[in-house]
Image: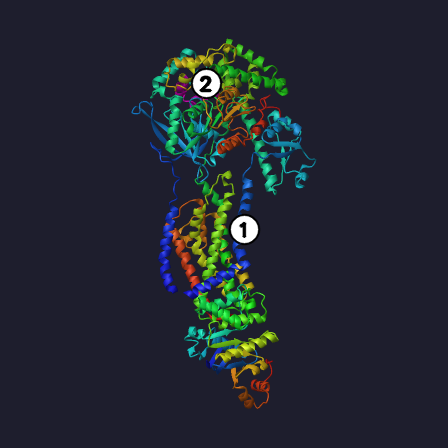
Amino acid sequence: MLINLLRLCAPAAVLWGMAWGESIAQTPEPSTESITGPSIKLEPCRIKDTAGIRGVDAECGTLTVAENPDDPDGRQIDLFVARVKSLAPTSRPDAFTVIQGGPGGSSIEAYVTLSGAFEPIRRVRDIILVDQRGTGRSNPLRCTFDSTDITEMSEELTVEYTQKCLDDLDADPRFYTTSVAVQDLEKVRQALGYESINVYGVSYGTRVALHYLRRFPQSARTVIIDGVAPADWVLGPDIALFGQEALDGIFQRCSDDPACSEAFGDISQKFAELQQRLTETPVEVSLQDPNTGEATTLDMNYQYVMGATRMFTYQTETASLLPLLIHQAHQGNYAPMAAQAQMVTAEIDKLLAMGMHNSVICAEDVPFMPTVDGLEDTYMGETQVKALSAICTVWPRGPMDEDFKQPVESDRPVLLLSGQTDPVTPPRNAERAAATLSNKLEVVVPAHGHGVAVRGCVPFLMDQFVEAASFEELDTSCVDRLVPSPFFVTFSGPKP
Amino acid sequence: MIRVQDVYKSFGEVKAVQGVSFEAPDGRITGLLGPNGAGKSTTLRMLYTVLRPDTGSATIDGHDVVNSPLQARRAIGPLPHGSGIYPRLTARENIRYYGKLNGMSGKSLEQRIDQLSDMLEMEEFMDRRTKGFSQGQRTKVALARAIVHEPRNVILDEPTNGLDVMATRALRDLIRKLRDHGKCVLFSSHVMQEVAALCDRIVIIARGRVVAQGSPDALRSQTGKDNLEDAFVAAIGSEEGLE
Amino acid sequence: MSGLWTVFSKEVKDNLRDRRTVLSSLGMALLSPVLFMWLMSFVLEQAISDLEESVDLAVVGADNAPNLMAFLESNNVSPGEGPEDPEQAVKDRDHDVVLIIPDEYGERFESGTPATLRLVYDSSRAKDSEKDYRRVRGLIRGYSQQVGNLRLQVRGINPAITRPIQVDSTNVASPSARAVSLLGVIPYFVIFSVFMGGFYLAIDTTAGEREQGSLEPLLAQPVARATLALGKLLATAVFSAATLVLVLVAFSYAIEFVPLEQIGMSVEFGLDKVGTLFLGVLPLVLLAASFMMIIASFTKSFKEAQTYLTFVILVPTMPLLIVAFLAPQPQMSNMAIPSFSQALIINEIIKGESIAPELIGVSVISTLVIGLICSLVAIRLYQREGMLG
């Protein structure tokens, strides 16, 4: 009896082993929704930040779309798409996307830079990313200019450079506006097979996020907008007005701070004097190149100070350097301030695809800029407004949805994040956008500036919000413990 | 009927059984008497086929224990030393298990169990788990188990060991009853009085050999003793190991 | 065949009533995951620093560094009064971590030379002291780095030049694969349970039966000894298999409670996985049952059997700890080893990776073959005269 059992067992064991092995070998892929339309073939790749330093393992692919949505047979462009899979074996059916600002920045590069802030979300959700058309690797509309000239740009030069950029473009720059871009995002969502997406937008990206919410409310499960650009707000004169407020705030904080005021006195006054001095007479400054250390000289005018100051008001860490830099320049040591300006401008053309930037602002901002009095009294003066207007004298104006400038109304959950000291999209912008959103929460992060996603407990708040898609259990009091970076009172740093 | 012919069994150096021959007829109680270590248990074990004789043969109702062990087993109801019933099963379940092993089943098995319960006066504890049973209760269950399949030959190895007076009495009555039903009853003992009281035939074993066998009268005349117990001692050669 | 069923069903019924057997099966099945979870939560707590947990930090000389204190506070570390003798205080567990800021800290900081401060902690208290120490040290390093970068920047030097080489690493292990280093102890528990499930039956049906005196009359019954042995063997195997199911189901529930995603790992251990795992380990059941029966057959008493078996079980289970730590890949060579190959199979399934059918075939066949050989030996042993003891 046992012998017979043996005879049966051996082949049974083999068959069984094989069948079972087969069954576990075919671990099925999570099924994607059946989609009508194109799908995207994703392959393993590595996505990097703007500087090309940090990288994240991802899957990449392209989605080909018509440049002009009304001319489907016309020129096609490739949208560069990336996906970072969640850690969980089965991801949530709704993915998470990041939309960069600028306009002109790469959302994929932005994600890599900010990835730490989204790690909690990534535990259970896939991150899907699209370089918006005209940016990153999605047919980028780049303009190249010599960075040293930027600070000496007159309006005529600006127009000349912009025209050259236009001429060199192999694209129709009209169709790179927000109204067109949101359709791309929806197509990518469908092609990747996600039920809906949770949208994070920063700076200009908040405009895209809000318009996507307006156009495709069923596809937006939650929205987080960080550094809010409301639909009915124009990027123009407010750059100078809000910027002045932010700078004044920094100067006030220095006066209130015993160490800072003791070291530098009336820094606001010193700034004004410096501005006047350099506007009248540029100074030749000898300095070491910030990267190479090579000795160089430049003709420093007020534009350098303005540019560096403006950039430094965006984050509290750099703001902490302003009084010292201003004081030193005021004393006649211009090199530190000059170097800052150099460092700031070096990155710009890598960071922004200027062509796309122009397409957006010339369709959505410049035509709607209000005439405002008092710009000349701000530290930026009319420079920005004049520069933007100059660009748009040659840059073509692209399509804009009819309701584009209307405030966005929605009942979808929207989390509005603002930095208290944001020099370009202060908390009042969020208030404005929130007025027409019925299911929202505004969070103002003290002490910080433009873009607060990585600050303090904000990543956890975002994670909780996205998971719950509601504000009920959200305790935002943890942001209140954040403080500004202390002012540098000497080159060695702040007080200990 | 049990027939043992010139059976030898050694365990290494130890020669436990050296040429034992005897017969146990049906309808008689045959006693195997001898001191401890005489080879009684070994002989019985060969009869219930748990050991095999080195040489010689034994048959149960004509079935050879070596060549037809299954048939031999079916013809016997063994009650070895120490009852060996399962403490976590009830008395009924113990008996039922053995009934099934002997090919019985269903209603007929249950009826037989009830019959045994009656016969051995076990109703009171039939459905209790046997853990904690007294010796007497245990012996009853073991006996019921042994005869559940109504074997012709019943073999008991020192069955009254550890029983009190009442239980011993009861067991003796049962053994007699079995004999009266025509069974061949073979039991071993080292208690002379018991053997004297119960047995129709006695086989005396000492040092692995049969030293005398026969009816009580035959033994008395063989040894020239009036008293059966004296006859035993004389046959074995000493009192040692006997009670 | 009815004899086989009779023996089998009696052994199952009898042993289900044995508290010791049931407890050891159930106990193993349920205790392992609980033990595992405890182990895991301990390990994970080391790895995850919950930034939302506030840390109370005793500081000596807080007045020497007000801005550093403000920075720590903004990162949920609350500076408090420091003790007289920091080292003693930490030893006495009055504090978990103490920060000492010497009086010359400020002067050195302002002069641009490295300013030292001290952290006192106790590394033997991993859960509180060491964890808090790492958090505070990390924060202070972060602050130092920030000040350092800004020092360069304000002097017109790009801080990036201090990072000449950036190492960009790619870890090819999937999140589930990374989990195996942590979860590698599961195969050990599972296979140990397979043995423990049949442990008491293996003893009971041989040495136990003999010691109790019930073996002799049983052998005198008209049932072939091989049938008796096989019935007992199958009952042992069934208990072992039942324990296997229990332990796998228990683990699949226990894993839900382990927050693996917090450390960048994940594992899928749903009921369908349980089924696959069960089938993968099932061949071992026969081998375990027969192996234990063989060893128990040679012992003279229950106690002796228990002692020997406990010792002998180490042979198939100890090497599994190697699997736990080294996580070897299944290959033709190691897949032929029973117990070891099942452990590898468990690992691969937990990882969510597929195994080549040939390798599974090797494992199944070799384990079954050895199991069958052991079964035949166990049955043979039952047929010896020496069985009676």
Count the marks: how many?
2
Q: Which mark is residue C60?
A: none
Colour logic: rainbow
Residue receiving disc 1 = C31
**Residue C263 in sight from this viewpoint:** yes
Residue receiving disc 2 = A232
SS category of the residue bearing label 2: loop
Q: Nearer the viewer, residue C25 or A451?
A: C25
Amino acid marked by disc 2: Asp
* Residue C98 place in picture, x, y as percent: 64, 35
Q: Chain of mark 1?
A: C
* Residue A32 place in picture, x, y as percent: 38, 37
Q: Is residue C27 magenta?
A: no
Numbered range of the magenta stretch: A344-361
Amino acid marked by disc 1: Leu
* Residue C356 place in picture, x, y as percent: 38, 48
Residue at 56%, 36% (x, y): give it. C50
Q: Nearer the viewer, residue B196 or C181?
A: B196
* Residue A222 place in picture, x, y as percent: 46, 29
How many other residues sit within 10 Å of disc 1, few (<14), some (14-19) or many (≥20)?
A: some
Q: Chain of mark 2?
A: A
